[in-house]
Image: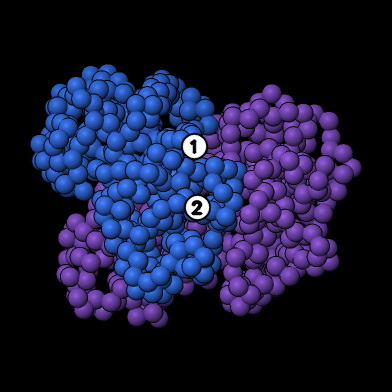
Chain colours: A purple, B blue
Amino acid sequence: MIQLDPPELIAARKRRVEQSADALGVDSWLLTTSQAVRTVTGAWSDEVDLFGEWSCPIVAAGSTVISPAVPPSAARLIDEVVDLLPVSGTVAVDRIGPLAMARLSELRPELAVQDAAILLGMSKVPREQVEIDALVEAHLRTEAALASMIDLVVPGVSERDLAGEFSVRAAERGLDRLHVDTVFSVLPREPAEAPWARGSWQGRLPYSELTTDRVLAEGDHVAFDAGVGHLGYTADVGWTLHASASGPSPEEVRLATQWDEVARRVIDAAKPGVSASVLRAAALEGWDPSLPPPWPYPLYVAHGVGTELAEPPFAGADFAPDAEAAMVLTEGNVLMIEPYIWRQGVGGYRAEYCAVVGADSTEIVSSLPYGRWPEH
Amino acid sequence: MEHMEHMEHLQRLQRAMAGAGLDALLLGGEAAGQFAAGHTRIGVHMPGWPIPVAAVPASGLPHVVTADPDGALGLPADHVHGMMWNPETLVSELPQWLGGGSGPGTGLRIGIDAMSPGGRALIEAALPGCTMVDGTRLLAEVMLVKSAEEVKALGELCLMVTAAAEQGLKGGRTALLRALNGAFTVAYPRVSDRSVQVAIRREGMIAEARLGPGDAARGERALEALRTGCSAGEVAASLPPGVHVTGIGWGYEAPLMRDGWATPDDLLLQPGAVLAVRWDACGVTAALDEAGTRLLSWSPEEVAL
C-alpha cells in the first residue's frame, strides 16, 4: 500500500526539487529507487522488498507513483510509464537497465536523459527546520533504544542476540525501518585477530562491522552501528560498548578521550562555507603522520545524513582533494562525526556525534555521553 | 557461503557468459553480487548503485567492492576493494580488474543489471568501445536452479520465519521481532491481529512468511500452475488473478510473474527453482523438482487464516 510522509516534510522537499529541476532544465523524472521516490514525492510502500527492490518496486514517473511497479531492468517498465513522461525535453533517471533504457530511447527519441543524482544532490539543501527536527528526533529515538541495551552487553551473549533485541527495542520506540543489519561486532585487539586487514586494508586501523553468532567474552569492545529510517529521513547512531561489569582501564579511557579530541576538532571546524577537506584536515591536526588516519578504511571521519544514510559532504572518503574541497557545508547540514581510535593490545573505540550546522557554529545534538565508555 | 559452493556458482556464471559472448558482468544487486563472488557484506537496503557490488571477468576470480573485508576472506586480497563513495575511484580501477596487467583492450561486451545513467557513462568512458548490455536474463537462468543443499537451507529458513510470524500473530510486533532472533528484515514487517507479513535475510539467503486472511483454493491453483518446462510467461498467463510469484533465494530473484505478465518472459521453470507465491494476505514458498511442486513452508490451507 502506498503511504505518504507528513505534508510539511513533503512540501519542504518538493520546493527544493522543483527549484533544482528548474535550474537544471529537468522537465520530469523517472525514479526507480524507493529512496529517490520517497525523497521527491513523499510516497513509500510498505510492500517494497528493500533488499534489491525486485518483487514489489515502487516507481515515480513525474508526479505519478506506481506500486508494485515493473523492475527497472525490464523494458516493460517503460511501456507502463511512457504516457506519464514528456515527449521531449529532459527526464532525470536514477537507475535503469539497458533494456529499459533502449525502450525509452525508442519510444521517446527526443527526450534527453540526465542522471537524477544531479537533481537529488542539488535538492538536499538548504534543509528546513521541520526536516532537521525530524532528523534529530530519529537520532534521539535510536539513541534511546541503544541506551536501553547497555546493560545487556555482557560476556556470554552473542552479537546476533544483541542485534535481535535492539530491533525489538527500536520498534518499541516507533522505529521499525532498519536500513542496515545492525552492527554488534567485537573489535580486534591484535593484528592477528584481523586476518582481513590485508590488501587495501593493510596499514589501516583494523575494524569490523559484520554481526555474527560470536559470543562476547569478558572485556570485549563491541562496535555498535545502526541505520534507522523515520519519516523519510535517517538516523545513524554508533558507539563502542564494553562487555564488562568493571570499568574501563586507563588505557581504554585514553582511547575514548583521544576519540573525543579528534571528533571535537572536526566539529569546531564545521561551519557554513567550510569544505569537507577542512574537516579531514581538522581530524588530522596534530595526528602522528606515521599512524593510519583516525577513521576506518574505507569509511570517513564525517559525513552528512538526511534522506540518505550517508550523503555529502564526505570527509576522509575516497574523493580526490579537489572533489572533497568542492563539498561545502551549508546551514542546516546534519553531520555525523565518527573517528575511530585503535591501539594494539588495547582495542578500538568509535562513536558518532550527530551535529547540526548552524549559521555560525555546529551544535552537537546527541544525547549520549560519547567520548566515554557506556556505564553498566 | 562455502568456498566450493561459490566456485560452482562462478563456473556456471562464466560458462553462461561465454555462451552469451559477455566479457564481464558488473553487478549492482547485492544478491547477484554475493552469488557470483561468495562474499558477505553488511546487509544494507539499496546498496550497490551506482557502484557495483561485484565485477565478474570472463575468466578468473571476481572482484568485490565492500566495507567488510572480513566477509571476503575466500578471495585474494587484490580482488577485495574498499567501498567506493566516489564513482571516479571505480573507473580508475575497473580497467585493471577486467583486463589484468595488459588492460582490458577495447570493445568489451559488459552485462549489467541496472545502473545510474551517470555511472554508466563513466564506465563507458573508462572502457573505450565497450557495450553495456542486459545481464539480468543470463543471471536469471544461472541463479534459478538451487542445489539440494541450498533448497534445504531455504526450507529451514522458511520454517524459522514462518514460526516467527506465528508468534507475531499471537503476540504482536514485539513477539515477531524477538522470534526473528536478529535476522535482518528485508521488507517492512507488517503485523496486525489478523495477519503477519515478514521477510528476512540470514546466512546470505532470503525467506518470507505471510499468514493472514485469504482464499486457500486460489493458492492451490497457483501452485498447480508452476510447472517445470513452462516459460514464466506461460505460467503467468495461467495464474489466478491477484497472484504474485517471485523467485527467492539469495535475494528476491527472477522470474517475477503477476497480472498475466512475467520477466523474463521466456525463462523456463526448472527443477531446483524456488518460488514465493503470494495472494490475498497469504504466501507460501515452493521448490520445483522432478516430481512436481514441493512446499518449503506451510500449505495454503495453513497460511490462509
Of badges 2 and 1, nearer the viewer stands 1
* Disc 1: host chain: B
Q: Is residue B10 above or below residue A307?
A: above
For the C terminus of chain A, the quadrant is top right
Q: Kindly indicate whether the residues beneath marks 2 and 1 are on one polypeptide chain.
A: yes
- The residue carrying mark 1 is B3
Could you say where residue B182 lies in the image, as x and y percent from the top left? 53, 31
Label 2 Cα neighbours within 10 Å, binned few <14 / some 14-19 / many ≥20: many
Q: Nearer the viewer, residue B117 or B12?
A: B12
Question: Which numbered marker is on residue A136?
Answer: none
Q: State the residue position of label 2.
A: B64
> Which residue is nearer to you in this view: A27 or A102?
A102
Horizontal placement of A197 versus B18: left or right? Answer: right
Residue at figure coordinates x 19%, y 76% from the top left: A109
In the image, what residue occupies the spot 80% across and 29% down? Answer: A245
Q: Nearer the viewer, residue A55 or B247?
A: B247
Kindly tell me whether residue B146 is visible in this rendering.
Answer: yes
Q: Which residue in the rendered view is the most extreme toward the front? A: B102
Q: Is residue A49 above or below residue B103?
A: above
From the image, which quarter does the N terminus of chain A lie in?
A: top left
B265 or A200, nearer to the observer? A200
Local packing at callout 1 (Cα closer than 10 Å; few below 14, some 14-19, many 20+) is: some
Q: Amino acid at mark 1?
A: His
Point out residue B284 in the picture as x, y percentages from the top left corner: 28, 27
The answer to whether residue A115 is visible is no
